[in-house]
Image (cartoon, rainbow, N blue to C red):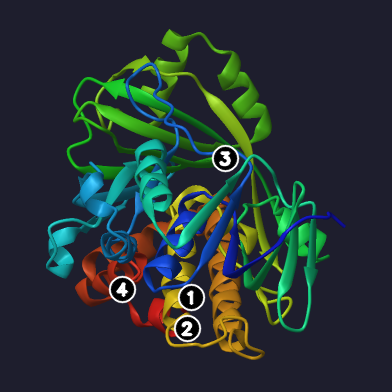
Amino acid sequence: MAEGFREDFEVAVVGGGPVGAAAALGLADAGRRVALIERCQPQIEVGALGMDLRTLALSPASQALLADLGLWSALKPTPYRSMQVWEERGTAAIRFEASDVDRTELGWMQENGPLAQAAWQRLGEHSNVELIVGEAPSAVEPQPDAVAIDVGDRRLRAALLIGADGAQSRVREQLGVKAQAQDTRQVALVSVVQATEGHGGTAWQRFLHDGPLALLPGCDERTAALVWSQSPSAAARRLDMEESAFCAELTRQSEACVGEICALDRRLTFPLVQSVAASFNPHPRVLLIGDAARVVHLMAGLGLNLGFEDVSGLLRTAQGALDPGAPGLWRTFARRRKARAQAMVRMLAALQGFYGLKQPAAQWLRNAGVRLVNDFAPLKRQIIIEAMGLGPLAGRLS
């Protein structure tokens, strides 16, 4: 164990990404003394087309949280008013409109860098927050009345430890908490593109033979974020393509929904794995949130929004608690969040499998279902409300 001065905090948050930063800010705003532990302070990374390759989809529920935390006014998000989903072998499409639920937007696209910068600026100025940057915890030791955390040559003590340190969570690993992983047999190829016609305020998603292709509104009308889920072999082939050939293939595979793709930033790939931690509350004084708790497929853009749901529920549960790590305080919260995570993982796995079926009967069934949803306004309205994080399912399990 590290030797050094023992320091006490009400809450220690490990992980300074969007979810961890939001949790730390919300708790600090509520008067809690918070330590935020992060190996590297987030940096703004602007690509060749003037946009961060890491682009986040934000639901109205997430927007409300960011507004409550005083972050929304510092951002310049791109709203999208509609979403269109169709498939390579299909004859029908479904289109969701903000006007279907009496709103002016379905959600927003936000670059990761400016969000991180806004959050860390507030954290650095907050009198209730201490930023501990440059080291990851080397040991985590839950105790009856606190959690001891070794960081460098310091030993910290906190009434509650929150692990928000991503899919490869050190907190989860040090506590021996398993995560049940489900390999999707896909990788995501991401980039930023420019097109001749533009996105028109619409998020476009087309289900291809080996995975969904999404073109999402970027920082200006002609710029779009590309998220293309596909087989590893297809991704390797497309990484090696010349830019002009890749742009031509992307134009063809997207059916030129944003016009001809005429420029491309660098291409990145990463494996797509879904996972759910065995426990979101493995000790009365330890919580796992965000990707440390669950990772879901990118196809619906739910990952960050589920993490922000964690934060909203966490802040409600902590409100008024004299001891933020009191035994039993987090039991119901953790059970509900795990149930929501499991439901999302099952739903996305089923959706991936359903669109992967190539039999004519499956194709007919998909097209019939798409037409039914598109034509049945009450069902479509409820799907939109739940996707925005404003429906009864999201509320009941947060």
State the residue at coordinates (64%, 42%): 39
Quadrant of the rendered image containing residue 147: bottom right
Asked which secondary structure carries label 1, the reply is: helix
- Depicted 257 relative to depicted 76: above or below: above
How far from the left and from the top, in percent, is residue 330?
59, 84
The x, y position of residue 225, in whole percent, is: 37, 33
Closer to the observer: label 4 or label 2?
2
* Residue sitting at x 41%, y 59%: 127
Q: Do the residues labelled 2 and 1 touch (CB within 8 Å)?
A: yes
Comparing 267 with 137, the one in front is: 137
Q: Residues within 10 Å of mark 4 (few under 14, many from 20)?
A: some
Measured in 3D between alpha carbons, the distance from the residue under mark 2 to the one under mark 1, in whole angstroms, is: 5 Å
Q: How far apart are marks 2 and 3 (CA)?
A: 41 Å
**Dot 1 or dot 3, earlier in sequence:** 3
Local secondary structure at mark 4:
loop
- Mark 4 or mark 3, which has the lower sequence index? 3
Q: Which of marks 4 and 2 is nearer the N terminus?
A: 2
Residue placed farthest to the right in the image? 1
Q: Disc 3 marks which residue?
A: 210
Q: Is residue 24 visible?
A: yes
List the residue tagged with mark 2: 317
> Are discs 4 and 2 less than 8 Å apart at CB?
no
Q: Residues within 10 Å of mark 1 (few under 14, many from 20)?
A: many
Tag shown at residue 194: none
Mark on residue 390?
A: 4
How far separated are the C-alphas under marks 4 and 3?
A: 31 Å
Q: How far is disc 4 from disc 1 in space, using C-alphas?
A: 17 Å
Disc 1 target residue: 314
Residue sitting nearer the eye, 193 or 95: 193
Q: Is label 2 or label 3 in front?
A: 2
Give amino acid for label 1. Leu
**Label 2 Cα neighbours within 10 Å, binned few <14 / some 14-19 / many ≥20:** some
